[in-house]
Amino acid sequence: PSSSPSNAPSITSRPTEFLPPPSVSEVPYTLHEAEDHTLSADSSIIYTNLGYTGSGWVKMVGKDSFVEFTNVDFGGGGSCQLKFRFALKRRSAKQKPAKISISGVEAGYLNFRATGPNGGYYGYDQVVTACPSGVHNVRLTAITDDGGPNLDHLAVSPIGV
């Protein structure tokens, strides 16, 4: 986004944003494409609905479906922003809540909302949390029978850089 969160509590859900990813000059971040990481058996990689980054996006179907981003380097640790790019059809009119964990430790929750009339409209939702130092896995898990969002990627940014 055009501005960084200021003095955010340790876990904060931010509203969905309809902006392109920030440029490297605005906020340093590492990008992790959902389709390149570990998926639950009921999640699948999709290559339709142009507008995604990378080679595709992940459809999370059903409760406990997940995408686990492996080998995410948090450097020296501290506050960080986990920003998820996703699509969710407006017709579904449902929010899709999901739990975020870092190497098995709960790091927050997001309530993904509709981004447009079809799967080609992407938005962002993010959480600011305390990230451990070193390399860890970040898992986004659907917590209702409706599944999770159609997930494009995760951008990880340190806070206060």
Image: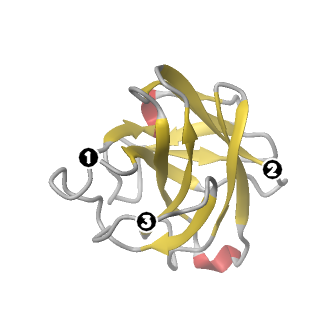
Q: Quadrant of residue 13?
A: bottom right
Q: Tell me the quadrant of the picture where the N terminus can be found.
A: bottom left
Q: Secondary structure at mark 3?
A: loop
> Would you name the residue on which mark 3 appears?
5
- Scheme of colours in the image: secondary structure
Mark 2 neighbour class, 10 Å CA radius: few under 14, some 14 to 19, many 20 or more:
some
Q: Secondary structure at mark 2?
A: loop
C-alpha separation, residue under disc 1 versus residue under disc 2? 30 Å
> Would you name the residue on which mark 1 appears?
28
Which is nearer the eye, 104 or 67? 104
> Which mark's residue is nearer the viewer, 3 or 2?
3
Q: Residue at x 53, y 23 (%)?
A: 136
Relative to 140, is 125 above or below? below
> Which mark's residue is nearer the viewer, 1 or 2?
1
Identified by mark 1, the residue type is Pro
Q: Position of residue 12 (x, y in %)?
A: 61, 61
Which is nearer the eye, 149 or 130? 130
Q: Is residue 51 left or right of residue 125?
A: left
Identified by mark 2, the residue type is Ile
Mark 3 neighbour class, 10 Å CA radius: few under 14, some 14 to 19, many 20 or more:
few
The mark that comes first in sequence, 1 or 3, is 3
> Would you name the residue on which mark 2 appears?
143
Q: Quadrant of residue 64?
A: top right
The mark that comes first in sequence, 3 or 2, is 3
